[in-house]
Image: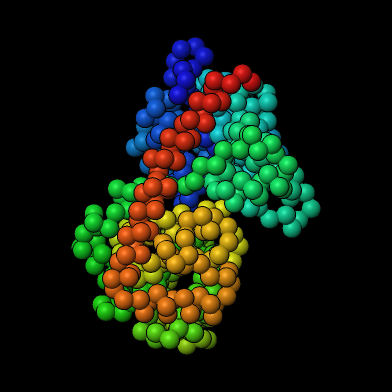
Amino acid sequence: MQEHTDGGRPVVLQVVPALDTGGVERGTVEIAQAIVQAGGTALVASEGGRMVAALDRAGAQHVTLPLARKNPAVMWRNAGRLAALVRGRKVDIVHARSRAPAWSAWLACRRTGVRFLTTYHGVYNEELPGKRLYNAVMARGERVIAISDWVAGHLIARHGIDPARVRVISRGVDAALFDPDAVSRERIMRLATDWRLPEGRPTVMLPGRLTRWKGQGVLIAAMAALRRRDALCVLVGSDQGRRRYSEWLMREAERLGVAERVRLVGECDDMPAALMLAEIVVNASTDPEGFGRTIIEAQAMRRLTVASDHGGAVETVEHGVTGWRVPPGDAAALAAMLDHALDLPAPERRAMGQRARAAVLEHFTVTAMQQATIEVYGELLRTPS
């Protein structure tokens, strides 16, 4: 990156609501690490969370602010707090990744003259009055990073943004961490025991936080329609306090007669080992995902993947080559594809897994994502405001 205007290290401040769990949060940590490695100073402002420790290990610095709050008065006060932080730490670029903190950051940048950058992570609903205006802040960056070509097309159409301001940077996988050859049998067996997974039964896994649009209910319905009655379903992810939904999922499994074959295992701190337990990894999202990092993580582990045929999955899953795509929300189509995948001869399954990992290593690595983002920072620092 280009040097700070006074000859020192460039300072980049990322703002997010919190640092608990999720793809946005992981991306924030990964970019902070890249900033430090590129010779810059990485700051992150958020309400905090379990990933702050990872920030510390990356050499970044965390500033605790109430940025998850959507109250307009709090957002206005946060703008003042961020402006003071920008001045005090001589910040060069503020990088916003979520709407509420982005409004505060945008106001702070207007007051201080600092460069403003956003990452547009997905499609925001506009069901309530004023929602389009609220969402539009994510298109106000001097540069707007879109996490897929699909997201780029959406934000250009929805907000009328000049395509010259958009930079498409796909999300990435740590190919060394998500490497099937690096996962010990002990790690795999520990999870199998904890999750009560008997040997010899095929496992269909859906990683992702428990929320209705992620499609856990669609997968449970598909399990009831499967020809392979020995297959198990494992739902990996936190319900984030949404107990009513997780309880509904188990009631639905009981209603459909598949409760014995469904496991809700909660958050997992060893996803590479978890994915090694799966014959097939599913993304069943009923709403389009901006990208869908869980699919490329599974592909990196040479797992078979089935994804909803919309959003970013169209770019990461080549149908019949590196995985399969099915109509979103269609439990019967998902069941048919799962049966097809489970019936594949072992050599064909291995070949598809190898093609999937090769595609990830070529197109979707964390290193490539980090390098491309650092290049956008450098572009802004070189461009007169």
Q: Position of residue 241 (x, y in %)?
A: 52, 62
Q: Position of residue 69 (x, y in %)?
A: 62, 45
Dividing the picture into quadrants, the one containing residue 329 is bottom right
Q: Identify the residue at image location x=46%, y=12%.
A: 7
Left or right of 313? Residue 141 is: right
Q: Residue at x 68, y 44 (%)?
A: 156
Q: Residue furthest right?
A: 129
| Residue 14 visible to an observer of this rendering | yes
Look at the image and tell me in which quarter the N terminus lies.
top left
Task: State the count of labels.
Answer: 0
Whether 134 is drawn above or below 278: the answer is: above
Left of 22 or right of it: where is 198? left
Residue 125 point in image, percent of width and height = 68, 55
From this viewpoint, is residue 137 visible?
no
Residue found 24% across the figure and 61% down from its top = 187
Q: Is residue 129 above or below residue 384?
A: below
